[in-house]
Image (cartoon, grey):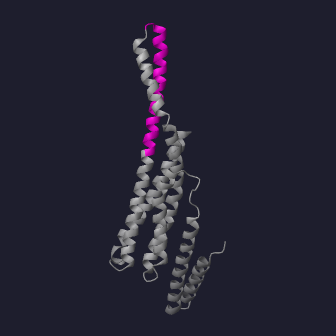
Amino acid sequence: MKRPGFLVGLAGVIVAVVGGVFGSPAVLLAGVVTGVIGLLIDVAQKGKLQRQDDPADMGAEARWLLRPIRELREGLAKIVQQSASSPEVGVIAQEAIVEADGIYAKAIELVRAREGLKKSLKARGEAETNLGRLQRQLAAAASDGEKSALESAVAARTEEIAAYDSAQSRVQEIDSRLNQAEATLAELKAKLMTGMVGVGTVEGHQDEFNEMVQRLKTLGQSFEEAQDMLEVKSS
């Protein structure tokens, strides 16, 4: 697939290099500006492609869980498109989009795993009912043989319910990570919007923006660790 933005950016880099070699500040500046514009075009085009990859095969609840992250990622892409007057905002947003893309892809896998866990939890009520019944039978058992058999059945049902408890805990952990990603992306988007309209200055908050992008990177790593944990527990 052709990527005009990438080609424009590459041309800008070449022009900047030529300007640097021949000591021409004007050519160097033109190359840098062209490179930034190409980068923003490329990111905007990638944003359009990303929106076509929504997981339509998922259930309504899964799509609802993913929607905030997807929409915030698209919001960052719009900031890039609208940041001609503030290219430094666009560059920060572009870096955030790269991280948001990774988070969104990993979130899809986590939500798929969550769907499986939620399906397994539907059998919990029946298991608890059976456990209560077995415990009553055990309390009323007269012979040692009957008690032994019922004790084994109670232990098996108790272990089954413990597995459901573990599954519920993993569902809650996935929900927590999704909420954390949504909150971080929303905060960064709001700060970038503020910088773009001139309410604040990016220069004065560069460390803060860098810290937030780093938080996105850390979130991406935590999503990957959660995926690995789910794979280990399911194997």
- Visible residue check, residue 211: no
Q: Nearer the viewer, residue 131 or 89?
A: 131
Residue sticking out furthest to the right = 1
Quadrant in the picture for the C terminus: top right
Q: Is 179 drawn above or below residue 80 in the view shown?
A: above
Quadrant in the picture for the N terminus: bottom right
Q: Nearer the viewer, residue 183 or 32?
A: 183
Q: Nearer the viewer, residue 222 or 76?
A: 76
Instruction: Please state the horizontal and vertical placement of residue 2, each as a whole percent of the image.
Output: 66, 75
Q: Within the magenta stretch, is there residue 167?
A: yes
Q: Is 106 drawn above or below residue 81 in the view shown?
A: above
Instruction: Please state the horizontal and vertical placement of residue 214, each as a whole percent of the image.
Output: 42, 63
Q: Which residues are magenta?
A: 142-171
**Location of residue 16 by image quarter:** bottom right
Left or right of 83 on screen, residue 34:
right
Instruction: Please state the horizontal and vertical placement of residue 169, each as a whole percent of the image.
Output: 42, 41
x 52%, y 60%: residue: 102
Examine the residues drawn in magenta and state their main secondary structure. Answer: helix
Left or right of 70 on screen, residue 10:
right
Instruction: Please state the horizontal and vertical placement of residue 31, each as a whole percent of the image.
Output: 54, 86
**Location of residue 231 by image quarter:** top right
Q: Is 153 drawn above or below residue 121 in the view shown?
A: above
What number of labels is visible?
0
x 45%, y 21%: residue: 154
Residue sticking out furthest to the front = 60
Q: Nearer the viewer, residue 160 or 40?
A: 160
x 42%, y 65%: residue: 213
